[in-house]
């Protein structure tokens, strides 16, 4: 007899495991299908984010930043260090321990909430009520039934045709987190979020890094003022070689060297590197799901079409996270998972897609939420802007991290906050206040009237809000 669940989630990344936990909290019987295995062949929860994405990359970013602090910043504090070296194997082992702790923590949460983990690959077998899903694992194929199914299978790196990714010399984000040595010359195809973060890690550890970006502009999704200042910091001060408007022509292995032939406004160029990271975006993981068995299909880009509540056109089938429209962000997937579980329970779950924050974990960090100035101009919205730098903030100076600024955009008539943009230390933490302001339809005056602790980086957010009305107090 087939196992039977109220809710079955396919995929245990941030969207999937959170959806499963919330559904269990609401009293449903829940199963979750996940096939992920570690390099040692052990089953693991958490998907790309926890295993080879968000969590391990941030661990390496922190390790590499600490190394750079010892080399270049501690002397200013009167702290001398000699013969500083990197034990890369130890650094990677720390990263792996953090990943293992996080993924095992999800397994503990599954047990606590009585969620059954079905180890294997899930695909739809038939529609109707209940829906039937086949799970193929080490023990063969089993069929399970569920009254509601949530597809949360995430995404995978986009590879370029003709470039063989072996995860050793030519890698995507997964292999780039596990290089066994620091390359002398590192090439990165793509200067987006992942390319910048991974390029930053290996630059700090000693690599000469060159990023090749197809777009003619740097970080076009960010506010223009932020991207311009970030360009200066990353290229002039940190030494990242970022080349824009690049068309990749050919990639060849030549002995121990990878040669990238490309074309830009100067004509045909050649770049020789020891290792290459391909970071040109991600594609939804929707192949092999058997969508046709329940009357579903994907669009031309592989996404499953859903409405504002992540419902597909098939009753009781939902899809969340990277397999549907919107930004491929773990926290967006989590919120969608919560929303779907609550709506299955008859509650009024929702996601405000206008208040989802973005973060790039470089140093300094970049974070934003809401509209950019260029978007408001294109939409013909009248606005006012306030900006305040970290360079005259006592806490930023004390930390030795004075780079960047906070910029707040507010409606010209109502003063409602429309967008907040941060370039600076701990921007990933500061942006939460801005996201809350947008969620509650706060005005710049509301932020300006809230008492912020002194000294703190958050004071810069308050000063930027005051600057919207041209009354910043410390500038």
Image (tube, rainbow, N blue to C red):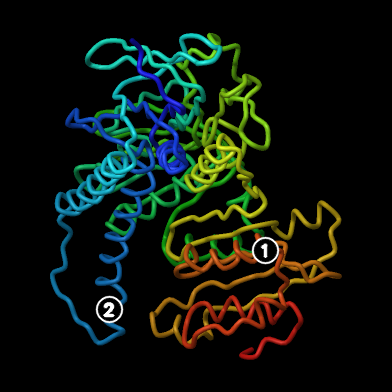
Question: Left or right: where does residue 387 sit relative to residue 201?
Answer: right
Relative to 391, residue 333 above or below: above
- At x 41% / y 41%, what residue is drawn? 21
Pair 2/1: label in front: 1
Which SS class for mark 1?
loop
Tags 2 and 1 touching, CB below 8 Å: no
Q: Residue 325 or 348: which is nearer the viewer?
A: 348
Q: Residue at x 67, y 51 (%)?
A: 354
Question: Which quarter of the figure has residue 44?
Answer: top left
Judging depth in this view, the residue of 205 and 143 nearest the camera is: 143
Quarter that holds the C terminus = bottom right
What residue is rendered at 49% in x and 27% in y? 151
Give the class, few, some or many, for how many residues have Cα within 10 Å of label 2's Cα (few <14, many ≥20).
Answer: some
State which tag comes first along the sequence, 2 or 1: 2
- Which residue is label 2 attached to? 74
Q: Badge 1 is on which residue?
A: 440
**Quadrant the N terminus occupies:** top left
Above or below residue 270? Residue 126 is: above
Q: Is residue 95 left or right of residue 193?
A: left
């Amino acid at each position: 007899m087939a196992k039977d669940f109220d809710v079955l989630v396919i995929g245990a990344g941030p969207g999937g495991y959170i959806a499963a936990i919330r559904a269990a909290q609401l009293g449903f019987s829940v199963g979750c299908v996940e096939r992920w295995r570690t390099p040692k062949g052990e089953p693991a929860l958490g998907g790309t984010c926890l295993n080879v994405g968000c969590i391990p990359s941030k661990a390496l970013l922190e390790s590499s930043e600490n190394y750079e602090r010892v080399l270049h910043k501690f002397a200013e504090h009167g702290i001398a260090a000699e013969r500083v070296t990197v034990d890369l194997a130890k650094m990677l082992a720390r990263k792996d321990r953090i990943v293992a702790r996080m993924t095992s923590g999800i397994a503990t949460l599954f047990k606590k909430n009585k969620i059954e983990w079905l180890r294997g690959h899930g695909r739809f077998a038939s529609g109707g009520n209940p829906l039937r899903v086949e799970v193929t694992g080490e023990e063969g194929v089993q069929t399970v039934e569920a009254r509601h199914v949530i597809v949360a299978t995430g995404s995978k790196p986009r590879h370029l045709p003709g470039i063989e990714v072996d995860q050793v010399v030519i890698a995507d984000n997964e292999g780039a987190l596990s290089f066994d040595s620091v390359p002398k010359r590192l090439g990165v195809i793509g200067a987006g979020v992942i390319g910048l973060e991974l390029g930053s890690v290996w630059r700090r550890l000693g690599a000469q890094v060159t990023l090749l970006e197809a777009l003619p502009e740097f970080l076009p999704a960010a506010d223009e003022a932020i991207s311009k200042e970030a360009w200066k910091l990353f290229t002039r001060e940190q030494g990242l070689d970022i080349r824009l408007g690049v068309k990749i022509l050919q990639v060849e292995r030549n002995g121990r060297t990878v040669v990238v032939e490309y074309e830009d406004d100067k004509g045909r160029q050649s770049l020789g590197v020891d290792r290459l990271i391909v970071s040109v975006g991600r594609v939804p993981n929707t192949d092999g799901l058997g969508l046709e068995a329940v009357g579903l299909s994907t669009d031309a880009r592989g996404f499953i079409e859903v409405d504002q509540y992540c419902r597909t056109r098939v009753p009781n089938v939902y899809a969340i996270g990277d397999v549907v429209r919107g930004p491929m962000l773990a926290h967006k997937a989590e919120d969608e998972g919560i929303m779907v579980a609550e709506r299955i329970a008859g509650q009024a779950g929702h996601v405000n897609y206008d208040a989802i924050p973005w973060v790039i974990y470089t140093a300094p960090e970049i974070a934003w939420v809401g509209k950019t100035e260029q978007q408001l101009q294109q939409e013909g919205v009248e606005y006012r802007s306030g900006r305040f730098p970290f360079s005259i903030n006592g806490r930023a100076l004390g930390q030795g991290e004075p780079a960047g600024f906070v910029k707040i955009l507010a409606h010209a008539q109502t003063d409602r906050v429309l967008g907040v943009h941060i370039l600076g230390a701990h921007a990933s933490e500061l942006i939460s206040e801005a996201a809350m302001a947008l969620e509650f339809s706060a005005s710049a005056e509301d932020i300006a009237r809230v008492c912020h602790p002194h000294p703190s980086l958050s004071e810069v957010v308050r000063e930027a809000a005051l600057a919207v009305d041209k009354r910043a107090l410390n500038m």
